[in-house]
Image (cartoon, helix red, strand yellow):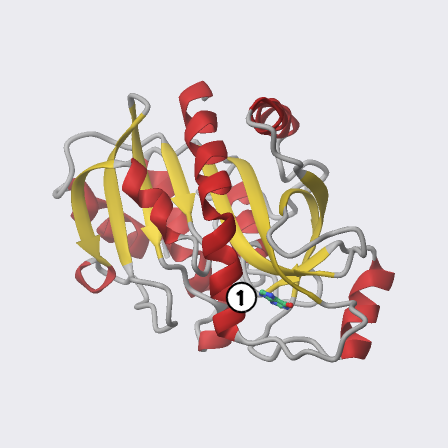
Amino acid sequence: MMKKIQEAVAYIRSQIAADPEVGVVLGSGLGSFTNEISVEKEIPYEDIPHFPVSTVKGHSGKLIYGELSGKKIVAMAGRFHYYEGYTPQEVVFPVRVMKFLGVKTLLLSNAAGATNRTFKVGDLMIITDHISFLTPNPLIGKNHEELGTRFPDMTEPYRKDLIKKADVIAAAAGYDIKHGVYISVTGPTFETKAEYRVVLALGADVVGMSTVQEVIAAVHMGMSVFAISVVTDLGIRDEENIITHEEVLAAARNAEPKLTHIFKELVAQL
Ligand code: HPA
């Protein structure tokens, strides 16, 4: 494992000028944040030793390296999902590589379905906490002490100081930003009506198919994490409409400028 990480890190370092301090993982339909970066290098995933390769529509599959607000940043345009058939360890591999590249703060975004009845399509929700136990934990198996401890604390996976900063940024921009709990599911099916009710009963405000495994790996390694969900559909709803991937992508794209603004300002304040 460490050898694979080191080989990936060595390759990426051979392509870039200086180590990045900020890492970004972008969700479905949310890739245009990378337009804000003054790009110095784009590295296709297939060129990086041991990197999985992305297969989902809306995920372009490259590592983008450059500068934003005076900081070196590395962004994943396209992430790996458990439902694609990758193991949880493969899903989190790029986050581990980011850590060993020097990344201290990880920002993540995702598209999610809301079960909180007060949420609307297009809302942004800062993730304050998560529920991981419907998806396999990426730390199952031998613990690599070089990465972190066997039993990592998870009382504050999403850093309160970053949440506070984002709240101020959002308020200054006039955004009505939500806070809430994200629950991860494996997908690729969207939930049945009964499953959305279970999600709600378990205490989650939104549900999605990503993020949590990456956050667990990041917290294991001591990274500071901040994450935002974009509400792309409503799980608990009165009308009988169905949810499609196209609708999720369209809703994500509409909300994207707000998300981009928050990430950009947050990076400036790190
Ligand atoms: N459920 C799970 N994942 C999702 C959803 C959803 O409703 N919307 C976007 N990703």
Vertical order, 143 against 170 (above or below)? below
Whole-percent x, y for residue 71 in the image: 31, 25
Vertical order, 75 against 68 (above or below)? below
Which quadrant, please, contains the N terminus? bottom left
Q: Is residue 83 visible?
A: yes
Residue, far right: 201
Left of 20 or right of it: where is 268? right
- Residue picked out by circle 1: 248
Q: Is residue 148 visible?
A: no
Q: Residue at x 48, y 50 (%)?
A: 144
Q: Residue at x 20, y 46 (%)?
A: 12
Quarter of the render that holds ligand 1: bottom right
Which quadrant, please, contains the C terminus? top left
Front-lying residue, 117 or 43: 117
Quadrant of the rendered structure where residue 115 is? bottom right
Q: Residue at x 83, y 70 (%)?
A: 197
Whole-percent x, y for residue 15 in the image: 13, 43
Q: Residue at x 70, y 41 (%)?
A: 178
Whole-percent x, y for residue 98 in the image: 36, 43
Front-lying residue, 222 or 84: 84
Whole-percent x, y for residue 108 in the image: 49, 46
Left of 158 or right of it: where is 142? left
Front-lying residue, 10 or 252: 252
Is ligand 1 closer than 8 angstroms to the Cβ of mark 1?
Answer: yes
